[in-house]
């Protein structure tokens, strides 16, 4: 008797069990939130490029959890400003503990994002595409670091127009706007004087009319810079 040979079935691979990151982390330390009496604080896990750790602790109500890691609000904002926790996973060095420049660039850039996109949409050419880069550090030829965010138009030959919001470590409270290589605006935001170097002061304490006036002035200078840049590039063609 001969029987038809059957190919043995390959064993089924066990399903991968994916554990969801916790929404909150409970610890045993006093919470650093002013007025909070909780003793369930977990330490902030932020460690900067110099291997200095944040020494604060935060209860489940006042902490920020990113991919299962506990952070204080300030350093959670810093991580999100430079592109999220995945950026640090691939070896990016985190800013110094007290460095609020990435946060300031992020707040300004997010508030101006709509107007800058509109300005670029109004001048883009048929062969140009658009992209926005996350906040990142750049070391200049002078050795100093600046934090910046860039919007740009580009084609197959490369970048054709850039708008950059930046803060230089030599003047950490001065916000600079550039169009391509031209510096078109530089000023300290009005909420800096009222709230020190806290970039979030813009959303909680600064007078709304002052804030809108600052952004309007900045947008006007960016718009003028874009017009001049397009005129110059058209003349070269």
Image (cartoon, rainbow, N blue to C red):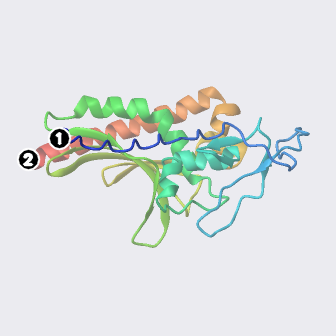
Q: Is residue 194 visible?
A: no
Q: Identify the mark nearer the N-term, 2 or 1.
A: 1
Q: Secondary structure at mark 2?
A: loop
- Which is closer to the viewer, label 2 or label 1? 1
> What percent of the width, then of the height, locates residue 15?
47, 40
**Residue found at the far front of this picture:** 1
Residue 131 numbered mark, or none? none
Q: Which residue is mark 2?
A: 237
Find residue 132 and report its image quarter.
top left
Q: Is residue 168 left or right of residue 118?
A: right
**Residue found at the far right of this picture:** 37
Q: Secondary structure at mark 1?
A: loop
Q: Is residue 101 visible?
A: yes
> What percent of the width, then of the height, locates residue 84?
51, 47
Q: Is residue 138 left or right of residue 98?
A: left
Say few, some or many: other residues with alpha carbon within 10 Å of mark 2 (under 14 / 14 to 19 / 20 or more): few
Q: Residue at x 89, y 38 (%)?
A: 35
Instruction: Identify which residue, 9 or 138, lies in the foreground.
Output: 9
Q: Is residue 202 left or right of residue 140?
A: right
> What percent of the width, then of the height, locates residue 39?
89, 44
**Residue found at the far top of this picture:** 209
Labelled pair 2, 1 in contact (Cβ < 8 Å) = no
Q: Residue at x 54, y 31 (%)?
A: 213
Instruction: Identify which residue, 162 or 42, lies in the foreground.
Output: 42
Say few, some or many: other residues with alpha carbon within 10 Å of mark 1 (under 14 / 14 to 19 / 20 or more): few
> What percent of the width, then of the height, locates residue 133?
38, 46
C-alpha gap between disc 2 and disc 1? 82 Å
Instruction: Identify which residue, 32 or 210, lies in the foreground.
Output: 32
Instruction: Identify which residue, 235 or 104, lies in the foreground.
Output: 104
Find residue 205 and report its image quarter.
top right
Quadrant assignment for the N terminus: top left
Residue 2 numbered mark, or none? 1
């Amino acid at each position: 008797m001969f029987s038809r040979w059957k190919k043995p079935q390959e064993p089924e691979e066990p399903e991968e069990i994916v554990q969801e990151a916790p929404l909150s982390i409970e610890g045993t330390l006093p919470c650093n939130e002013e007025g909070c009496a909780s003793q369930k604080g977990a330490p902030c896990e932020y460690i900067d490029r110099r291997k200095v750790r944040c020494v604060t602790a935060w209860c489940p109500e006042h902490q920020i959890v990113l991919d299962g890691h506990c952070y204080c609000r300030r350093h959670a904002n810093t991580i999100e400003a430079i592109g999220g926790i995945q950026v640090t996973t691939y070896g990016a060095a985190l800013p110094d503990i007290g460095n609020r420049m990435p946060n300031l660039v992020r707040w300004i850039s997010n508030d101006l994002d709509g107007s800058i996109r509109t300005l670029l949409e109004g001048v883009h050419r048929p062969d140009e595409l658009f992209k926005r880069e996350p906040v990142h550090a750049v070391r200049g030829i002078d050795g100093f670091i600046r934090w910046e965010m860039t919007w740009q138009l580009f084609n197959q030959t490369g970048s054709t127009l850039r708008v950059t919001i930046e803060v230089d470590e030599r003047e950490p409270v001065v916000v600079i706007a550039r169009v391509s290589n031209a510096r078109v605006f530089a000023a300290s935001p009005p909420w800096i004087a009222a709230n020190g170097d806290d970039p979030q002061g813009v959303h909680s304490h600064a007078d709304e009319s002052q804030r809108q006036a600052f952004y309007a002035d900045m947008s006007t200078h960016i718009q003028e810079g874009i017009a001049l840049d397009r005129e110059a590039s058209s003349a070269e063609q």
